[in-house]
Image: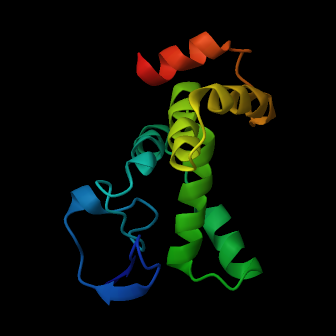
Amino acid sequence: MTMRTVSLHSGQGSDQFPAPKSGMCPIAGRFLANLRLAPQYQRVLERRHRAEAPHEDLVDHLVRSTPLQRGEAARVVLDVLAYFDETTEEFVRRRHRELQSQGLRNEEIFERIRHEMPHRAVAPPDLSARQLRRLVYG
């Protein structure tokens, strides 16, 4: 039996023999995710095992309604689930890193994050610049 795998870096797929269970994505074994390279999927995949909430119907819908292949559709589902699974702390740290890499100073960064947070899918409580700094620096 072969499996379809998709590289997280290139997005290209290839058929391979089954990989060890630890690296296999639970979406019907058709898509392998290297969790060391994509830790944002870890919680999503663990919760899926516990809740037994299959997303096959969503993957099937994406395959039918878009030009995506099954492995690519599974990756999109995992990306969306991981995005909505991000905690406030993870969001603040990620945005701080992104904005810092653009050359912004902390004062501008924390002000921008404060304005972005109410527009998240589940809006967190209003945090002050000091509280945001504590999330980033401890």
Report the side of 87 relative to 38 (left or right): right
Q: Quadrant of the C terminus?
A: top left
Q: Is residue 138 above or below residue 109?
A: above
Q: Nearer the viewer, residue 99 or 11?
A: 99
- Image coords of residue 20 (percent x, y): 19, 65
Above or below for 1 versus 124: below
The spot of residue 71 in percent (x, y) is: 50, 76
Residue 110 falls in image quadrant: top right
Q: Is residue 85 above or below residue 39?
A: above
- Viewer-side residue, 53 vs 20: 20
Tell me if residue 55 can be seen: no
Whether residue 110 sits left or right of residue 70 in the image: it is right
Rendered image coloring scheme: rainbow
* Res 74 → quadrant: bottom right
Please tell me which residue is depicted at 44% across the width and 50% down the height of the picture: 41
Q: Is residue 86 above or below residue 69?
A: above
Q: Can residue 112 be seen from the camera position used here?
A: yes
Pick out the residue farthest to the left: 20
Q: Which residue appears at 43% of the width and 40% of the height?
A: 43
Q: Position of residue 104 (x, y in %)?
A: 60, 40
Q: How many marks?
A: 0
Quarter of the image with the N terminus is bottom left
Q: Position of residue 65 (x, y in %)?
A: 76, 78
Which residue is at a point 41% across and 44% down the rendered structure image? 49
At 50% across and 19% down in the image, what residue appears?
135
